[in-house]
Amino acid sequence: MATVLERVPSSGGFARVARRSYRLVAEVPSIPLLMVAVLAFAAVFAPVLAPHGKLDPVKPTPEQCQAKFGMANCPYVDNVPPFWARGGTFDTPLGTDFLGRDVLSRLMYGAQISLVVALTGTLFAGAIGTLLGVLAGYMGKWWDQVIMRITDAWLTLPSLVFAILLSSVRGPGVWNVVLILALVFWSRYSRAVRGEVLALRERDFVRLAEINGIGKLTIIRRHLIPNVMNTVMVLFSLQVGVAVIIEASLSFLGVGVPPPEPSWGLMMAQERESLMEGKWWLAVFPGICITMLVLSANMLGDWLRVRLDPQLRNR
Amino acid sequence: MRKYILFRALYSVITLWLLVSIVFAMVRLTGDPVKMKGEVGADATYLERIRHDWGLDQPLYRQYANYIGNLLQGDFGHSFEKSLPVRTIYFERLPNSLKLGFAAFVISIVLGVPLGMLSALKVNTWWDNVGKMLALVGLSMPGFFVGMVLIIIFGIELGWLPVLGKGRSAFSWISPSSWLTFWFKDWPHLVMPAFALGWYFSGAMLRITRSGMLDVLGSDYIKLVRLKGVPERMVVAKHALKNSMIPVLTFAGLNLLIMVNVAVVIEVIFNWPGVGQLLYDGLSNRDFPMVQGVVLMSGLMIVVLNFTIDVLYGYVDPRIRLSR
């Protein structure tokens, strides 16, 4: 029987996989996918694509120096407006910041930081939370009690407040932000995963595995974790957006990514004074980047949730 | 009922104790509060003195006992920067945060609830898509970005609204006349920060109203009411609305407290002197007791609110109070 099925024409392994993955890609909402793709592309190829460096000021032309300082030579020209405004050039399409650095290049390097920090932070949180959730749900008894009581207490504090507390003892630093995100967000996963495991535990395949004398660790690894992955993936995609906002907020408050690095939140904080002088673009561009990234992450997350859970179609 | 309340109270106390212990452990595991106080290359004897002053040179169990003992007496320690008890400073600032939180709360309800209902009543139409899109954008635009855009448009370009501060009205615990007038003065100062803060939560309110309303509209008793020929307007106004509002109001209550506590970035942008700004000052002055005090207070508020919600639910719904 099995051999007959295998010989059905055109359903060879490769063709089938190709067709399935094409369908999956065709189904993904295109707008958020495009936004994420643009940001990821800019982040990955920033060293090649960026017109200028991320930390060094742009070398100004003599005309610019003349216009700004009345001298032929100057180390840098700060606050050059974007290309459409008077005095803007295509050399620095989005202008320069208060230290004469190219805003576009910094935004591109900023995408690196935002993506790496949010993704790794959420990934660690997901790993810790999933593991603890499975343990609580499957082992039951005092494992469940202890883990879930801690989870509940953990969930009490608003995530930003908790993140600020941790950052007050950790200080600024890229990897500190990752650590903080992991420590703050694991509890979201353990709560959801535990509920899922409680239902899975009663299912026949888990029961049969137990009767066959398969060890608890193997059941967790082979039967439980693969089955909670749907939930974890949906949560993951929805948490990435929140993580981006928390990173930006911490950087804005000066305890996230430390200064010379171009984090979007930090760029907004540094340009608060220019805002009052009417140079609105300096704060608005990073804000738009944050919104784009969070918006597309949320849209993809919503799509994934609906796809993986048909009951939610109309929500 | 009494048993249920006792059970919930015990549960809240355990949650609170765990929370307090988590804060204690996390602070000591992930970093060193004293290192934050000393600048790079600070004098070692100076650091030792702070360590001694804060009792951080004692064994852990002793530190823990002191910490819990102090908290039980309502003592959150002394602010390093202002040499006042954290509690005093906190309660001076709290009314400002409450004012901002209430205003943002009203905005989030006024924006979120009607739009969410509209979205649910006209499900899968053009209206619904607009509603869903608004909720999504609301949840994706960070409040501080909204705040900055508002400042640019209404504060700088148009010059309609004041950009910084809370105005001159002040709340004072010792003058009862200010207890009432405080809330109704200096509205122009409040508009922008409240909108920036309420923005995110109105997206959340829209979503929860929509799904709550959809749940109720799909239920059997609404079908029965419709079968009886009650006009659609009455179905919504008289029968669906009340039941769909229960989860919305619970969520709104929790949101109010969260808004009071997470307004940090908004308060920094608008220079609003609430508890969020205390947190920020604590961060930039490396004033650890201040940060810890504000964090613990926000935890306490939320645990108390959760307890209240549980008890109210117990009164309303017998299934909940008998389930344990």
Image (spheres, rainbow, N blue to C red):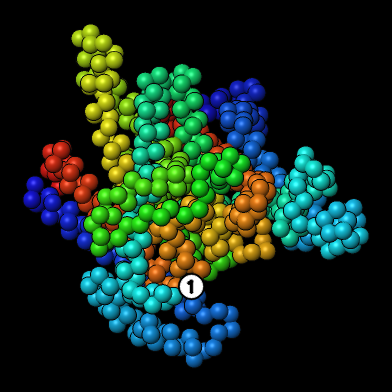
Q: Which residue does the image show at 65% across and 23% down from the upper left? A: A10
Residue positioned 40% across, 47% down in the render: B186
Whether residue B18 is situated above or below residue A282 in the rendered picture: below
Q: Nearer the viewer, residue A271 or A26?
A: A271
Crowdedness of circle 1 by 10 Å Cα count: few (<14), some, many (20+)? many
B28 left or right, relative to B299 = right
Residue B161 is situated, as x and y percent measured from the top left of the image, at 51, 44
Q: Position of residue B142 (x, y in %)?
A: 52, 46
**Residue placed at 32% from the left, 51% from the top?**
B182
Q: Position of residue B3 (x, y in %)?
A: 9, 51
Of residues B92 and B120, the one drawn nearer to the viewer in this rendering: B92
The subunit carrying tag 1 is B
- Residue linked to disc 1: B286
Choose top left, top right, bottom left or bottom right for residue B49.
bottom left
Which of the 4 image quarters holds residue B242?
top left
* Residue lying at the far top of the rendered structure: B229
